[in-house]
Every structure is written in C-alpha cells, then in structure tokens.
Image (cartoon, rainbow, N blue to C red):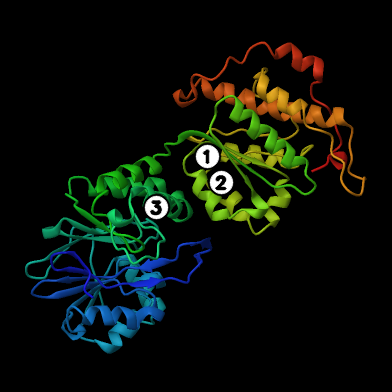
C-alpha cells in the first residue's frame, strides 16, 4: 500500500518491531527506519535504511514506481540505519547519482572503500527534479558531523534526518494518529539519549531553518509530524536552550539500604512541601528512561557511592549527567566523590541547578521545612541481616539531617532564583533545632552503612 506524505512524496521505509536496544539505549516500542521517495519528472530517494530491511524498502518503492527509474539517492547521514542499504541499492540500480555532504563523502568512501561515485552538496545547493525542488541544509553535530536535512520546497516538507525523531514501531505513520501526548514523551526520550549533548548545534540548526515555511517534518525514525509541527519546533528549542520544568528528579543506588532511606526521606519531604518529584532506583530502572527524565527536571539529585555507580552498566546515566557539567562542577564532583559518605549530586550547569553532597560539612543553607525534618528524624538506624552494618540511630539520623540540610538549603537558594518554585512554605523556625539535634558528625567512611 502506498503511503503518501505529501503529493508526490512517499514513505518507503521499514518498521522494526523487534528492536529493544538502539545505539545503547532502550527502545521499548521498537522503531522505524524512514526513507522517502520524491517523485517529480525525475525521482530521488532520500536515505536507504538498515541493510537487513533492504527488501522491505524496495517492495515499498515498487508500489510507487520502478526503482530503475530513480535518478538520485540522497544520503542525509552516514550511520548504518540511514545508509546501510546503500551498496545493495547501488549494485542493483547503478544508474543513481549519490549525493552527500563533504564530511559524509569522506566517511562513505572509507566505509565502502570508494566503490560508489559520490556528488558533494552543501548548504544552499538545490536539486531540480522537475515539479519538485530539493534544497540542502547542513546541520553538523545534529547529531554527527556529516548530517544534513533535505527540504522539498513545493511541499514545505523537511526531511529532517535524526532531528525530531522518536523510536516508535507502529502501523500509524503520522503524529495525529497517535496524538501529541503519546508522541511527545518518545520524542523527549529520543532527544535526551541521542541529541542532548549538542544543544548549541541544535539551536544553530533551528536558526538556519527560520524563515523556511514548514508544514510537514519527516524524521528518519518514528512518526511524521504534520499536525504538531509548531509544537515540536518550539519544544526542541526549549530543550536545546536548557529550559526545565519545576520538578526534582532523585536517582539513587544502594548496597545495604542506607542510601535508599535517604532518597525516600528526601522524596517524601519534597512531596509534603509541594515540590513535584520523581524517584528512580538506579539498579532496577532503565537508564534510558532516567536520562529522559533528566531532560526536563529543574533539579537532578544523584545519591550513592559514585565509584559503585560508575562500575554498574547504568553508568550511562552518570556519563550523561557529567557531559552536561562545566569544568568547575566536574572538579567539585570529583573532589567530593571520595569523602565521608561518597554521596554527590551532579546536574547541568545552566537551568538545572546543581547540588553536591559529600562530607556534609559543606551545606548550602541553614534551615529546613518541618515536613522534611520530620521524615529525616523518623528514619530508623540500619540493622542489616548480618548485623555487622548496624549503626547507632543518632549517628544515622545526624547524617540524614546533614543531607537534608544541604538539599533543602539548596532548594531555598533555588526558590529565590526560579519562579517555578515560588509559593512553597516558609523555611523559618528550624535553624535552632538543627543545632540541638547535632551538626556535622564526623563518621569514618568505613563505618557508614550504604
């Protein structure tokens, strides 16, 4: 069955229902490898998808035209989910002229050993098909150096490469068939796991597209945007600029339950003072889902022994966080990582507010709201099965108090800078009580239950 995108432009890609791991992150809903056939007096195929799906792509092309009539093959991107079928297609249909960016030319020649003739195109170059005009725009590092997008002038259609994609395997082809509320979270997960390190490059690409009318955006993965074009463009700009929502993300790892109790105490306290919060145990959560949450959380809290966290396969989360730090914050995280309880927070250095917890001697404020203090005081001392890690309740509570002290002091500072957190209860009436309950206990690291 033909799948028209606009008049004379067809989706001829493939659906991968089985894939659950893509470039190292999870794809619970599968994905698609999208290719597009642009039919004018001459015909161009944009991208050639993964090699195992070559026959599926060719079958869809034959529903529209004879593949032997294709004059041009446009390679928007070198990666194998985009160009994997290129040698197969060229061997079967050697009449095609292959177009790519200057950077893609070198990569394709190395990968395919120079066996395929290539024509280089740059930003502003135009390919006339007769009734259809293709205009090329290079978008380096969105998300590879070779990347470009292809604009079909007559249809106001952007063949967007990896931008605006999602990993969704579905019989639906368009955003309005499944709805914004379904597609947007998948677009966020895709952006967070693939594109997030390249926010400045995304902004440059969006700026390069300004002034170009867009009615349809057809990415290389997932659904085609035809109804929510304005929303996804605005959302991408917000993500690229680091804008966040007024909520907190708490991620923790624990060996013996101590860190889990701290994480739960922090989470429950935040709930009671009206701050939206989400809690993830790192060991049993999908790291790709956690990274998706990082995209829009205002405050990201990572709790646990960083040396343990980094050894887990879930180190992806820490690596994603670390990639968003500036040098000052990286140094601070490294300095804190070996201190008394090896608890640190890392967060992005712009609109994601960073808080660090290490020795707990360094606190960011001097007051706690009553609900969080109550939760911390209510935490019992640990008593693991073998008894060797049991610790005095007073020492444990004091450690938790210091943790809460730092967190809520940081939140108090945060409230003063971000309107999204305005309206929370007063932080007063607690300063003296902290002093009476114990300040900054010096517990040797080998005696701290984690």
Mark 2 and 1 residues: CB-CB less than 8 Å, in contact?
Answer: yes
- Which one is earlier in the sequence, the residue at label 1 or at label 3? 3
Mark 2 and 3 residues: CB-CB less than 8 Å, in contact?
Answer: no
Indicate the quadrant containing the C terminus: top left, top right, bottom left or bottom right: top right
- Which one is earlier in the sequence, the residue at label 2 or at label 3? 3
Q: Which residue is drawn at the image coordinates 76% and 42% (left, top)?
A: 338
Residue 102 left/right relative to 10: right
Crowding at mark 3 (Cα within 10 Å: few <14, some 14-19, many 20+): many
The residue singled out by tag 2 in the image is 321
The residue singled out by tag 1 in the image is 348
Q: Separation of disc 1 and disc 3 at Cα?
A: 20 Å
Helix, strand or loop for disc 1: loop
Q: Which residue is drawn at the image coordinates 42% and 54% (left, top)?
A: 186
Residue 5 is situated, as x and y percent measured from the top left of the image, at 20, 64
Tell me if I can see residue 363 in this picture: no
Residue 202 is situated, as x and y percent measured from the top left of the image, at 35, 49
The residue singled out by tag 3 in the image is 187
Hey, which quadrant is residue 125 in on the image?
Answer: bottom left
Q: Separation of disc 2 and disc 1 at Cα?
A: 7 Å
């Amino acid at each position: 069955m033909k799948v028209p995108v606009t008049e004379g432009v067809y989706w001829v890609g493939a659906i991968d229902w089985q894939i659950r791991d893509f470039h190292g992150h999870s794809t619970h809903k599968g994905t698609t490898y999208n290719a597009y056939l642009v039919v004018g007096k001459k015909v161009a195929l944009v991208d050639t998808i993964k090699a195992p799906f070559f026959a599926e792509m060719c079958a869809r092309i034959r529903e529209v035209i004879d593949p032997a009539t294709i004059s041009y093959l446009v390679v928007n991107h070198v990666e194998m989910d985009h160009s994997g079928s290129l040698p197969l297609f060229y061997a079967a249909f050697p009449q095609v002229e292959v177009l790519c960016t200057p950077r893609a030319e070198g990569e394709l020649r190395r990968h395919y050993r120079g066996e395929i003739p290539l024509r280089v195109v740059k930003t502003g170059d135009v390919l006339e098909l007769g009734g259809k005009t293709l205009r090329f725009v290079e978008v380096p590092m969105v998300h590879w150096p070779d990347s470009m997008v292809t604009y079909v002038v007559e249809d106001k259609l952007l063949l967007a490469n990896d931008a605006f994609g999602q990993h969704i395997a579905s019989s639906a082809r368009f955003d309005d068939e499944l709805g914004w509320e379904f597609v947007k979270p998948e677009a966020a997960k895709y952006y967070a796991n693939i594109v997030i390190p390249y926010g400045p490059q995304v902004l440059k690409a969006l700026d390069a597209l300004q002034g170009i009318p867009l009615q349809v955006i057809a990415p290389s993965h997932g659904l085609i945007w035809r109804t929510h074009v304005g929303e996804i463009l605005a959302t991408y700009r917000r993500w690229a600029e680091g804008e966040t929502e007024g909520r907190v993300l708490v991620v923790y790892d624990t060996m013996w339950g101590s860190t889990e109790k701290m994480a739960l105490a922090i989470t429950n306290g935040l709930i009671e003072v009206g701050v939206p919060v989400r809690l993830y145990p790192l060991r049993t959560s999908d790291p790709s889902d956690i990274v998706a949450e990082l995209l829009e959380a205002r405050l990201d809290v990572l709790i646990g022994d960083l040396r343990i966290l980094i050894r887990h396969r879930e180190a992806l989360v820490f690596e994603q966080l670390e990639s968003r730090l500036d040098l000052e914050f990286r140094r601070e995280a490294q300095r804190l990582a070996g201190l008394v309880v090896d608890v640190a927070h890392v967060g992005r250095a712009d609109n994601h507010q960073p808080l660090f917890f290490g020795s707990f001697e360094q606190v960011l404020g001097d007051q706690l709201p009553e609900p969080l203090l109550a939760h911390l005081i209510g935490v019992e001392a640990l008593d693991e099965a073998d008894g060797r890690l049991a610790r005095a309740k007073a020492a444990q509570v004091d450690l938790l108090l210091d943790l809460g002290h730092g967190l809520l002091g940081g939140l108090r500072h945060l409230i003063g800078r971000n309107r999204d957190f305005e309206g929370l209860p007063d932080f007063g009436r607690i300063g003296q009580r902290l002093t009476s309950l114990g300040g900054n206990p010096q517990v040797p690291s080998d005696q701290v239950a984690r």
